[in-house]
Amino acid sequence: MQYGTAICSYTLDNCPDNNDLFFIAITQINHGGPNLVSDPSKRRVIALLNLKAGNLSIIFSDYTTALSLFKHGISYLGDDKWSSNYELSLNLFDAAAEAAGVLNKNEAVTSYTKELVTHAKSYDDSLNCLTVAAKSLHQAGLVKVTYSFFFESLYHFTRTYIYCSSYRSQCHPHLIYYLTLERSLYVT
């Protein structure tokens, strides 16, 4: 872990374009794991570095490595991730779902999406992840599961407001469309 943080500091300060050295540093840090870091601010920085490395892996079309890095980033945030690091958690879960979708790991896509939807502060915060999940499940031929999952997620955001006519005028356009679609097509 110490070697990884030293290499990472050196790389970010002196050779920001040296991707190989950056990946070596992140790999060394991740080998140590989140249990070796007790300071929440350091854990957040390591999670950010994993997000950065994961996004860089996607640029190189290495989705397997990207997913692994996003998982590591999530693990460094701890149990209170959604209350203490909302934006970072949102970005990591969204990116992890997207990488898992490309790799056809439908259970992982569903898991990341469900957690993100559960903790999302708004429908817009979850829209990309929901789209990834819908595409992934649909491509796997799980059309009924896709509809069920998507409407369950929408219900999460609308359960309090669904029958309030004054709120309907404030609804996101996608939400109104899918609520209408749910009433006519929903399959249990």
Image: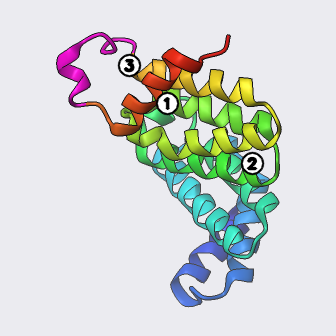
Residue 162 among those drawn in magenta: yes
Q: Which residue corresponds to the image point at 66% horizontal and 51% vertical from the top-left?
A: 98
Label 3 to label 2: alpha-carbon separation: 27 Å
**What amino acid type is highlighted by mark number 1?**
Asp
Q: Quadrant of the C terminus?
A: top right
Task: Say above or below: 19 vs 138.
Answer: below
Provide the secondary structure element on which disc 3 rests. helix
CB atoms of marks 1 and 3 within 8 Å? no
Q: Quadrant of the N terminus?
A: bottom right
Label 2 sits on residue: 100
Label 3 sits on residue: 158
Image mark count: 3
What span is in magenta?
Answer: 159-170
Residue 142 percent location from the top left of the image: 79, 31
Q: Nearer the viewer, mark 3 or mark 2?
A: 3
Q: Which residue corresponds to the image point at 37% horizontal and 32% vertical from the top-left?
A: 121
Based on the displayed image, in which of its 4 quarters is residue 180 positioned?
top left
Residue 52 percent location from the top left of the image: 58, 66
User: Between residues 72 and 162, which one lies in front from this camera angle?
Assistant: 162
**What amino acid type is highlighted by mark number 2?**
Ala
Residue 16 percent location from the top left of the image: 56, 85
User: Between residues 38 and 84, which one lies in front from this camera angle?
Assistant: 84
Provide the secondary structure element on which disc 1 rests. loop
Ranked by sequence position, the earlier of labels 1 and 3 is: 1
CB atoms of marks 3 and 2 within 8 Å? no
Label 1 sits on residue: 80
Classify 10 Å Cα crowding around label 1: few (below 14), some (14-19), many (20 and above). Answer: few
**What amino acid type is highlighted by mark number 3?**
Thr
